[in-house]
Amino acid sequence: MTRTVVVTGIGATTPLAGNAKDTWAALLAGTSGIRPIENFEASHLSVRFAGTVAVEPLDSGLEKAKARRLDRGQQFAVVAAREAWADAGAPDVDKTRLGVVCASGIGGITSMVNQYEILINEGPHRVSPMAVPMLMPNGPAAWVGLEFGAKAGVHTPISACASGAEAVAWGARMIQDGRADIVVCGGTEAAIHPLTISAFASMRALSTRNDDPAAASRPYDKGRDGFVMGEGAGMLVLESEEHAAARGAKVYAIYGGVGMTSDGHDIAQPDPEGAGAVRAIHAALADAGLSATDIAHVNAHATSTPLGDVAEALALRTALGAHASSVMVSGTKSMTGHLLGGAGAIESIFSVMAIVDRKAPPTINIQDMEEGLGIDVVNGVARDLPSGDIAVLNNSFGFGGHDVAVIFKSA
């Protein structure tokens, strides 16, 4: 019999706040975390704004000595994981029954580029002995695993912008399969750098609203012109229901199920029919033992790209059928920007908190709604979700055609 998996801890550091609870409060208030870039000289770039974290890791309690050994994305992961672990009550668990799954879409790109510059400008003897651990994509998972002494397994899914949601699903699978009793899982990203910004801008994937950064990410608006890069991390503590009950842990929500598919269409563009997303949503519903009418809210991928938003809306209409127009849909990247490998993780937290507080967060910056979407977008102001048993769907889609749909249920 498949073990029931519950959420017992959450932690985050985002463009909105340095922890999960304050991030959620800012989200419900419709606050934008998008701002001009100040971490480096950006005046020569075509895009000069992003969702940089609201609180730097050192200001979140990360020790200076430890920070020097970690890539920025690894720092975010440790900060968020510590918060999630404390929120779960710092559980006493057999370390051989403790796992970690922490995703990254790109890995330690800033560390790689910085070390290359040191190599060129100062010579090979100046390259850091920590360069490889800092740049390797599994570094965040490894450091979180070391933080808590996890010995059931430490894993790193890399599926572009679907990575964080996939990590949550694999964490739940470790518990369902009996490999672990507790898994710390989520995603992180720290890719705001002139190289990556220039690369995404060359693809015409980014918004270029340099004159109004806070209003740049506008999912479902007719004037949307691309996504906004964000950084940060989100981590959840998942636990078997039996283990959580035995220690009297608080339970935020129940992990329902997942659907993971692929488009087989294009390296960057979504399938315009949303077929892969439809299959992922159907698979998630089946895995959770639910029907479309059980879904009360969707945290949509909704990156604010011209093609992606329309394709996802079509997928929701197809997958949820006649019920689609009754489901409240939120595009939270309008406030956080797109955290790439961390997006599905922080949005899993948003999905869980939507269940806890019975609130669907707003989608901000919609001035002229795209016509014919056929979905109920939560525009501008948060809305109340119904009482009773509800389920929330979290969609994450990534370059390469990765489609991940995760469902959480009320406890």
Image: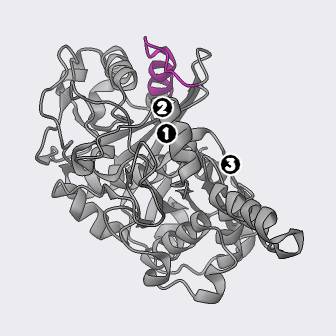
The magenta span reads 268-283
On the image, numbered disc 3 is attached to which residue? 177
Position of 60 compared to 36: left or right? right
The answer to whether mark 3 and mark 1 are in CB contact below 8 A is no
Residue type, numbered disc 3: Asp
Q: Quick one: SS at disc 2? A: helix
Residue mark closest to the camera, 3 vs 1: 1
Q: How is the image coloured?
A: one colour
Q: Quadrant of the N terminus?
A: top right
Residue 259, image x and y in percent?
53, 31
Give the number of the disc on residue 62. Answer: none
On the image, numbered disc 1 is attached to which residue? 257
In depth, the one of 208 and 53 nearer the eye is 208
Q: Quick one: SS at disc 1? A: strand
Residue type, numbered disc 1: Gly
Distance of label 2 from label 1 (alpha carbons): 5 Å
Residue mark closest to the camera, 3 vs 2: 2
Q: Residue lying farthest top? A: 273
Residue shown at 47% from the left, 71% from the top: 84
Q: Quadrant of the C terminus?
A: bottom left
In the rendered view, would you say 85 is above or below 383? Answer: below
Give the number of the disc on residue 284. Answer: 2
Distance of label 3 from label 1 (alpha carbons): 14 Å
The answer to whether mark 2 and mark 1 are in CB contact below 8 A is yes
Neighbours of disc 2 within 10 Å: few (<14), some (14-19), many (20+): many
Position of 132 compared to 198: left or right? right
